[in-house]
């Protein structure tokens, strides 16, 4: 989905495990904008970009959210840490920006792909990206968690899916094996939401594709 893209945005970029291959894929055409509020991880993205001779990555030490200039703190450990709002000022406070505000500030166009893996705050990121989604119509890959995205009335009626549908998107679940099966070169399997049955541990979700 990133092939030939002018701009790609990755929320929850971790140490660059998706950022590096995407940036490599578009190094002759565009830029990858990585958002990672964990300073240790964002520093690793910079290091990994240098190791891979990539100069088309913009690393933002910010949290994407549904409002800009909010304060958040991490709750949990490392890759599974989620973000919650706070009113406190401390050394570990995280600052937010919306996708829409970032796109306007940087005057970005041609956004072909938006990837979101932020441990439960995906709906917040999507809410802050509505104008970008309307204008650019990027492919969106995002995680969903039953703790934060209510599936009780069916996955097709979860808040994140209803938002994407309201913007004209069609949404699919991505078949997950969680490393229980060596998928090798198996094609990625997309599932219609009303046919998707999923039971996961409470701290984890699975991936969705919106087109």
Image (cartoon, grey):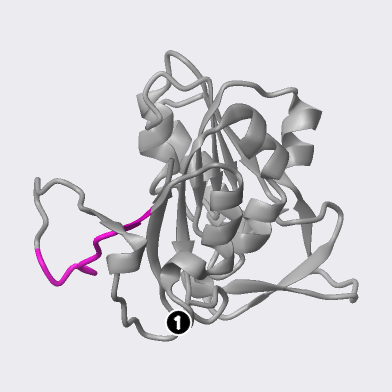
Q: Locate residue 1, reporting x and y percent.
A: 37, 32
1 to the left or right of 109: left
Q: Residues within 10 Å of mark 1 (few under 14, many from 20)?
A: few
Q: Which is the main secondary structure of the residues drawn in magenta?
A: loop
Name the residue at the bottom extreme.
202
Q: Is residue 201 magenta?
A: no
Residue drawn at the location 75% of the way across and 56% of the way down: 66
In what element is the residue under mark 1?
loop
Which residue occupies 89% across, 76% down? 88
In the displayed structure, would residue 174 be above or below residue 50? below
The magenta stretch is: 172-181
Query: Residue 45, percent across and down?
Result: 50, 45
Asked if residue 163 can be seen in this view, the reply is: yes
Q: Which residue is mark 1?
A: 203
The location of residue 163, given as percent across then percent down, is 61, 56
- Looking at the image, residue 189 sits to the left or right of residue 72; the answer is left
**Residue 7 figure quarter:** top right
As for residue 177 lying within the magenta part, the answer is: yes
Residue 177's place in the image compared with 163, above or below, is below
């Amino acid at each position: 989905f990133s092939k030939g893209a002018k701009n790609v945005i990755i929320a929850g970029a971790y140490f660059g495990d998706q950022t590096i291959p995407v940036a490599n894929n578009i190094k002759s055409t565009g830029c990858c904008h990585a958002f990672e509020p964990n300073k240790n991880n964002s520093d690793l993205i910079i290091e990994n970009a240098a190791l891979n001779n990539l100069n088309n990555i913009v690393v933002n030490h910010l949290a994407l959210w549904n409002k800009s200039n909010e304060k958040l703190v991490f709750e949990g450990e490392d890759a599974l840490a989620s973000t919650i709002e706070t009113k406190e000022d401390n050394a570990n406070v995280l600052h937010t920006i919306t996708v829409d505000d970032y796109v306007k500030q940087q005057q970005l166009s041609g956004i072909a792909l938006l990837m979101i893996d932020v441990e439960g705050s995906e709906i917040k990121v999507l809410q802050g990206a509505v104008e970008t989604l309307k204008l650019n119509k990027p492919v969106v890959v995002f995680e969903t968690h039953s703790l934060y995205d209510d599936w009780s009335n069916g996955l097709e009626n979860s808040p994140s899916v209803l938002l994407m549908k309201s913007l004209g998107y069609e949404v699919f679940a991505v078949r997950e094996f969680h490393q229980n099966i060596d998928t090798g070169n198996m094609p990625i399997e997309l599932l219609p939401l009303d046919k998707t049955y999923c039971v996961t541990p409470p701290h984890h979700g699975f991936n969705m594709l919106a087109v």
